[in-house]
Amino acid sequence: MKDTGRRRIAPLRGVRVPPPDAPLVGWRPLMVQVVLFVGAAISYFAVRDLTEGSRAAADANADRIVSLQRRLGIDLETTLQGLIIDHDLLIDLANWIYIYGHWPLIGITLVMLFLRAPAEYRILRNAMFISGGIGLVIFAMYPVAPPRFGALEVFDTVTNRSDSYRTLQPPGLINRYAAMPSLHFGWNLLVGIVVWRVTSSRLLKAAAVVVPVAMAFAVVVTGNHYVADVVAGGALALVGLACALLIASAPATARSDRVGT
């Protein structure tokens, strides 16, 4: 077979590497990804500024969600937190999942896919961007205060039992009224699905199932999201994934991925 001169990257153990049309190798593709994610961050902060003065609307919307959940019989936040509130170890575990099981995990997954499975990297990236873009519109139009702000009698376990999260993401840098939908859960679900798709390792497949489930539990018991937020976040993530898969299945000449972006 003719040697193209391109160095092949050995796949991870137990990982199937899909044949990419345009491997993401070199500084140009890397810088394109950096620009894309920086642009997404700027968009997030723009929406945060739009909703900064929306406390009254956010509280009213939170009350509507609580009322809807009661009618549907899924108002489980107080009950679920009650299962762990007297157990410091369980509270710490929930906090750690919420803090370290989201951005650090997503970042590591994106980097590994970028290096070893570019086709799946594109799917995860595009699914995050699509669902995140829709989510930003929802945050701007329908701000919702999280349960820990008083809509329910729940305890803010992250703020009161851990300094890590507020250090990693200071309150001044987060959107306080972005409870609905929960991208904290939705994006973990996307990571789980993509990891399941790309690996043949039983251990990684088990983690792909356990991590999103653990995050769904953690975002509720820490007082950061309603059950409805989790449902909506999962649905939105699946919409983003469906769109990303459609993009991936489009003819190569019609995709921006043709140039490695």
Image (tube, helix red, strand yellow):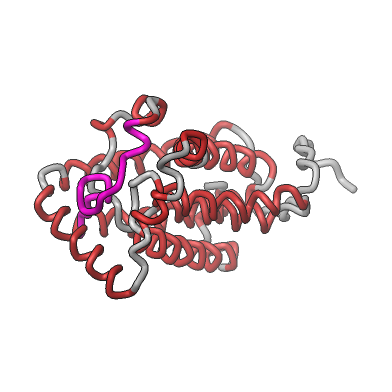
Q: Residue at x 56, y 42 (%)?
A: 110
Q: Residue at x 17, y 41 (%)?
A: 49
Q: Is residue 32 visible?
A: no
Q: Nearer the viewer, residue 167 or 25?
A: 167
Q: Residue at x 76, y 37 (%)?
A: 9
Q: How far from the left and from the top, in percent, is residue 248?
A: 57, 62
Q: Nearer the viewer, residue 56 or 250?
A: 56
Q: In this rendering, would 241 be left or right of 17? A: left
Q: In this rendering, would 79 be left or right of 194? A: left
Q: Is residue 246 magenta?
A: no
In the picture as drawn, the residue positioned furthest to the right comes out as 1
Q: Is residue 165 above or below residue 74?
A: above
Identify the magenta region: 142-160
Q: How far from the left and from the top, in percent, is residue 236?
A: 41, 63
Q: Is residue 156 visible?
A: yes
Q: Is residue 159 magenta?
A: yes
Q: How far from the left and from the top, in percent, is residue 150?
A: 20, 48
Dominant SS type (magenta): loop
